Image: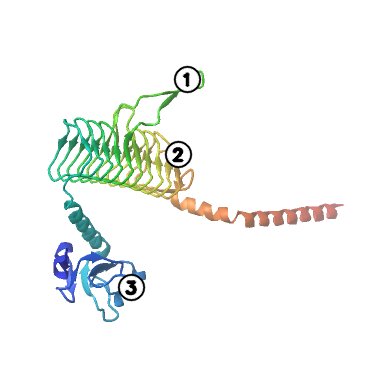
Amino acid sequence: MQFTAAQIALMVNGKVEGDALATVSSFGKIEEANKGQLSFLANPKYEEYVYTTQASIVIVNESFDLKQKVQTSLIRVPDAYSAFAVLLTKYQEIKTQQLIGVQQPNYIASSATIGTNVFIGAFVYIGENTIIGNDVKLFPGTIIGDNVTIGNHSIIHAGVKIYFDCIIGNHVTIHAGTVIGSDGFGFAPQQDGSFKKIPQIGNVIIEDSVEIGANTTIDRATMGSTIIKSGAKLDNLIQIAHNVEVGNNTVIAAQSGISGSTKVGNNVMMGGQVGTAGHIFIADGSKINGQSGITKSIKKNNTAVNGTPAFDYSSSLRSQAVFRNLPELEKRIQELEKIIQQLIAERVSDIN
């Protein structure tokens, strides 16, 4: 599909500077884009490319000051990065909306309810009493267990497994290979040293507008529900244990692990490879630096922490600076000890 600069400006509440009839049909990076492509400039490091780019249209910030003439048509917006994200989202929606129908072979239980405008790829399994909402896309190889509910406009990518009784909200995206609702890690130690499995009879609830990256695992609750609340965004390769709650609009980067029954608040930002202990609480607005280990609850909202065990971010950075200087500090201490020993020896000599 082709769009003119004028049409794009309407979508993002922007103002065209140049040829309003310039057309684009795809996207490109500003340093590599060709004629007929749309790009954007948000990072000042790439400013030089706006004067040489072959892109037909470039989205820029309203405040961007041109230092020389450009060949491309500009669309000025309050925030170029956000505007470009809106356009990418619309582009993806148009592409996915074109996917409608049922490919073969697959298995759909007779008791399952399938909504309208659904796409079901090849080798999909849909279990008994499962409800698939309107405009849902199930890509090839997905397995949807019994009594599962998937809300409207959700996208389940190839190879996702959703176990029985789990609930997926509206406008949810789950990327390839993710497993929702596998058993939580619950084993009771026995007197003979063995471990007895504790049945995990709860479920997982994924609320609206959640996005879950590839190969992430979210365990079902022992009892009750493991809950990912509305607007949360989980990266690839994340482990969410049983009975965890992840708050609204919280973001968690790759390779992080949240231990059982931990409650993560709203609007938390968690870097990559963060680990938490179980049964703790992380307050709203917390910012957790990558590779941090959270061993106890963070009770104060909007706290930034770093390190293992994690503590106040600023104090952590000062501690790291001291740690880097330890070899030099050791050397200075040894020199001071020699001076003290020498002074003591001189003092003893004077006394004698």
Using the rendered image of the protein, determine whether residue 45 is visible from the camera's viewpoint: yes
- Outermost residue, left direction? 116
Which label belongs to residue 190? Answer: 1
| Residue shown at the point (17%, 63%) measured from the top left | 1
Residue picked out by circle 3: 47
- Upstream in sequence: badge 2 or badge 1: 1
| Residue 179 drawn at (x, y percent) | 33, 39
The amino acid type of the residue labelled 1 equals Gln
Rounded to the nearest angstrom, the CA distance separating label 2 from label 1 is 27 Å
| Residue shown at the point (30%, 80%) measured from the top left | 67
The amino acid type of the residue labelled 3 equals Glu
The amino acid type of the residue labelled 2 equals Thr
Quadrant in the picture for residue 220 = top left
Rounded to the nearest angstrom, the CA distance separating label 3 from label 1 is 65 Å
Circle nearer the viewer, 3 or 1: 1
| Residue shown at the point (12%, 43%) measured from the top left | 116
- Outermost residue, top direction? 191
- Upstream in sequence: badge 3 or badge 1: 3
Q: Nearer the viewer, residue 178 or 48?
A: 178
| Residue 338 drawn at (x, y percent) | 74, 55
User: Which structural element holds mark 3?
Assistant: helix
Circle nearer the viewer, 2 or 1: 1
| Residue 106 drawn at (x, y percent) | 23, 39
- Asked whether, in this view, residue 152 is left or right of residue 283, the answer is left
User: Which structural element holds mark 2?
Assistant: loop
Which label belongs to residue 230? Answer: none
Rounded to the nearest angstrom, the CA distance separating label 2 from label 3 is 44 Å
Q: Nearer the viewer, residue 231 or 194?
A: 194
Residue picked out by circle 2: 295
Using the rendered image of the protein, determine whether residue 9 is visible from the camera's viewpoint: no
Total number of numbered labels? Answer: 3
Q: Are marks 3 and 1 in contact (CB under 8 Å)?
A: no
